[in-house]
Image (tube, rainbow, N blue to C red):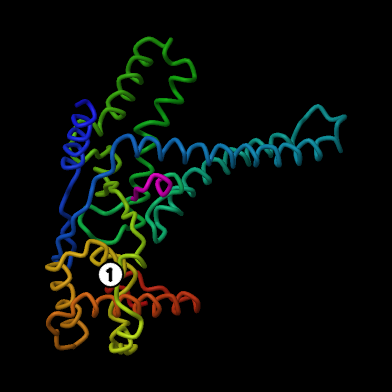
Amino acid sequence: MSAAIARNRFRASEAKRQRQLVTPEGLSLPLTIASRGARAGALMLDLLFIGLGAFALILFLVSIGIGVLSIGASSNQSPALEFVAVLLIMLFWFARYGYFLYFELGPKGATPGKRLLGIRVAARDGGRLTAEAVIARNLMRDVEVFLPTFFLLGGAQEAGVAGSAATVWLAIFVLFPFLNKDRLRAGDLVAGTWVVEAPKVKLAEAMSLAPDRREDYRFGEAELSVYGEHELQVLESVLRQDSDEALREVAQAICRKIGWMPGAGHDREFLEAFYAALRDHLERGMRFGKRKADKHDAG
């Protein structure tokens, strides 16, 4: 009986996290909001990875600093170690921000920690995840967590009113995801983002069209140049969800955009063929240093 109750509670929790995302193209896509536990676990993993990288870097830079210092050991000054200390501070700052910015702006929209736990960052308006949004949500993390945490670890809990204020500040932002239904932290609210579960099914397994049927469709350079990486990701999501209505709407929208007459009853076959052709087209462009972010990008 307890197992059945647990399953029912899990299903109820899953249902509460279901959302419908409407893309700029007017397409409604189902998605699942990431759980608070998954988000916290991903952050811990990412901080662990950053910490391990920082530890290795410290060992390397300290060894260089000590080596340089030994050349002028008779001096009372320690310019080499001072240089190493300044360099470490700068590298830590750039590494922490660079880590999150690099991975969240990548094609997966997720850091290694998020990818391990099957979640990713997405724009709440269904559009492309922009650099401004990623920078905003990561800068807010300092205000939410890091600054008050460092303040408290530095002994602020004994600083009377200041320590109490830092504790309350940290508690408010830590509890913020529990106070809204989309589990948003303050950085997500400011940046217009949310963290969602990434599809776990490989696209190759979701696509059922035989290779010889794809050859029935031929797309030229002008037709493939209409869309970019963002539209490719949206199309991939549609194919994964495998909703007949969504497949039909997207197939008709693409046909209108590239000047084709939409057929009937072959929506998935058409979309799979267009997806394969578009992906190949974009990958060829990347090999020559050309990237097209979305349909508004001139390339």
Q: Horizontal and vertical percent for residue 195?
A: 29, 46
- The residue lying at 37 percent from left, 75 percent from top is 279
Which quadrant of the figure contains the C terminus?
bottom left
- The residue lying at 41 percent from left, 49 percent from top is 115
Q: Farthest residue in the front direction?
A: 1
**Residue sitting nearer the eye, 102 or 264:** 264
- Amino acid type, callout 1: Glu
Q: Is residue 137 above or below residue 248?
A: above
Quadrant assignment, res 147: top left
Q: How many marks?
A: 1
Q: Horizontal and vertical percent for residue 98?
A: 49, 49
Label 1, secondary structure: give it: helix
Left or right of 44, for residue 248: left
Q: Horizontal and vertical percent for residue 68?
A: 80, 40
Q: Horizontal and vertical percent for residue 46?
A: 47, 41
**Residue sitting nearer the eye, 274 or 206:** 206
Q: Is residue 232 magenta?
A: no
Left or right of 183, for residue 156: right
Which quadrant of the figure contains the N terminus?
top left
Q: Is residue 118 magenta?
A: yes
List the residue tagged with mark 1.
231
- The residue lying at 25 percent from left, 34 percent from top is 177
- Range of the magenta residues? 114-120
Left or right of 74, for residue 113: left
Quadrant assignment, res 179: top left
Quadrant assignment, res 175: top left
Q: Is residue 221 above or below residue 41?
A: below
- The residue lying at 44 percent from left, 78 percent from top is 285
**Residue sitting nearer the eye, 246 or 233:** 246
**Residue sitting nearer the eye, 32 or 104:** 32
Mark 1 neighbour class, 10 Å CA radius: few under 14, some 14 to 19, many 20 or more: many
